Image: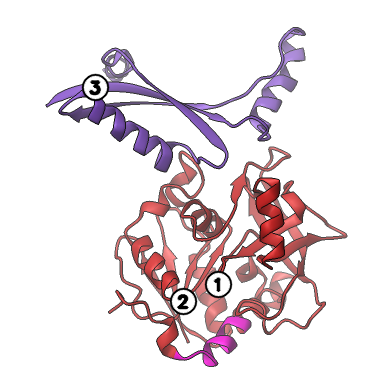
């Protein structure tokens, strides 16, 4: 068995109202920013999978993305392999 | 009639639902979410609250609690299920009722009395409600904006699955499409609604209209053969 680390980016589908993105956009004038628009807010999930090969690991991540991390009716997602765990080690560092 | 109210970690409407069910004349007990056993209940209520802290998306983590296996079997066997507030979000995530509950359009947690138009009184959830009588009850949620793509909304309406709509003068509090406040699954035995009938079950609470929902369920259970409401995996 080997370990594989992935990031899953979940975004509201085009055409779905994104009140968080709209709220962020509405706050921009307070930062004196007037050249930014189309703000959409999503979610990123990182995870490590133990599997026999990269294909099996990725299939597990795709399954979790569709069943758990995203609601396919309103959200789309992209799975990408990432280097082993910079976010994990930095969290461990902070915890110390 | 025997009512089971599920307690998830973070439920806060479970005891109110238990109380309202008893006021309506039912025998009622709490069911723990980790045990996939409905104790022979005819009606399962998924109560309001913030199951699993609403982490990830409201309702999605509770959907995978062990008791949901029994709830799914119960629904498949024609058993009655009512999801209130967070319970509606759980039913929607479990695909036991149609629709998705998005963040309120106002971006605020909305909590207030609303008025509901009852679209049908020929269901087990509404049979004791006089036709044309609106219901006043409170709601309290951050994610109650009912959403489905347009074509699916049309299909939902055509199939008579819209059961409650927000009505004037208070109107639509959360941006729900077509003012939808509650729906039933195809088959008409599973219902989800965002407002809280159990919090309007006695006049001292400002309204006892919600009790009509519980009375409907108790009365319709009395008219339903017990064999229909027993799930095969129960007992």
Q: Crowdedness of circle 3 by 10 Å Cα count: few (<14), some, many (20+)?
A: many
Measure the alpha-carbon separation of dots 3 and 2.
Answer: 43 Å
Residue drawn at point x = 72 percent, y = 75 percent: B120
Using the numbered discs, state the Cα–Cα distance from disc 1 to disc 3 in whole angstroms. Answer: 44 Å
Image coords of residue B65 (percent x, y): 35, 55
Q: Name the residue that disc number 3 marks.
A: A4
Can you tell which chain is drawn red? B
Q: Quadrant of residue B191?
A: bottom right
Real-space CA distance between mark 1 and mark 2, rounded to the nearest whole angstrom: 8 Å
Mark 1 residue crowding within 10 angstroms, few (<14) / some (14–19) / many (20+): few
Query: Would you name the residue on which mark 1 appears?
Result: B187
Give the chain letter at badge 1: B
Residue at (60% x, 80% y) in the render: B124
Which of these two is toward me, B25 or A68? A68
Badge 1 or badge 2: first in the primary sequence: 2
Image-quadrant location for residue B218: bottom right
Which chain comes out purple in the rendered image?
A
Badge 2 local density, few (<14 within 10 Å), some, or many (20+)?
some
The secondary element bearing badge 1 is classed as: loop
């Amino acid at each position: 068995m080997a370990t594989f680390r992935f990031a899953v980016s979940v975004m509201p589908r085009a055409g779905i109202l994104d009140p968080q993105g709209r709220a962020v956009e509405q706050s921009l004038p307070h930062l004196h920013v007037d050249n930014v628009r189309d703000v959409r807010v999503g979610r990123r999930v990182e995870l490590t999978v133990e599997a026999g090969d990269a294909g099996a690991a990725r299939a597990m991540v795709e399954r979790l993305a569709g069943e758990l991390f995203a609601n396919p009716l309103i959200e789309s997602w992209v799975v990408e392999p990432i280097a082993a765990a910079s976010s994990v080690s930095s969290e461990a560092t902070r915890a110390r | 009639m025997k009512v089971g109210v599920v307690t998830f970690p973070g439920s806060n409407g479970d005891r109110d639902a238990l109380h309202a069910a008893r006021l309506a004349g039912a025998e009622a007990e709490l069911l723990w979410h980790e045990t996939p056993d409905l104790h022979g209940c005819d009606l399962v209520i998924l109560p309001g609250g913030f199951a699993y802290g609403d982490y990830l998306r409201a309702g999605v983590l509770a959907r995978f609690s062990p008791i949901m296996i029994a709830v799914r079997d119960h629904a498949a066997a024609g058993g009655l299920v009512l999801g209130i507030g967070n319970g509606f979000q759980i039913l929607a995530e479990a695909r036991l009722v149609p629709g998705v509950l998005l963040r309120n359009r106002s971006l605020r947690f909305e909590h207030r009395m609303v008025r509901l138009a009852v679209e049908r009184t020929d269901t087990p959830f509404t049979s004791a409600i006089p036709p044309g009588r609106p219901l006043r009850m409170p709601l309290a949620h951050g994610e109650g904006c009912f959403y489905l793509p347009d074509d699916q909304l049309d299909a939902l309406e055509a199939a008579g699955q819209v059961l409650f709509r927000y009505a004037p003068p208070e109107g639509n509090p959360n941006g729900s499409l077509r003012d939808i406040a509650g729906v039933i699954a195809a088959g008409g035995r599973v219902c989800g609604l965002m407002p809280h009938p159990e919090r309007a079950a006695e006049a001292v609470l400002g309204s006892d209209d919600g009790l009509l929902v519980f009375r409907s369920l108790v009365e319709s259970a009395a008219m339903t053969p017990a064999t229909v409401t027993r799930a095969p995996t129960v007992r």
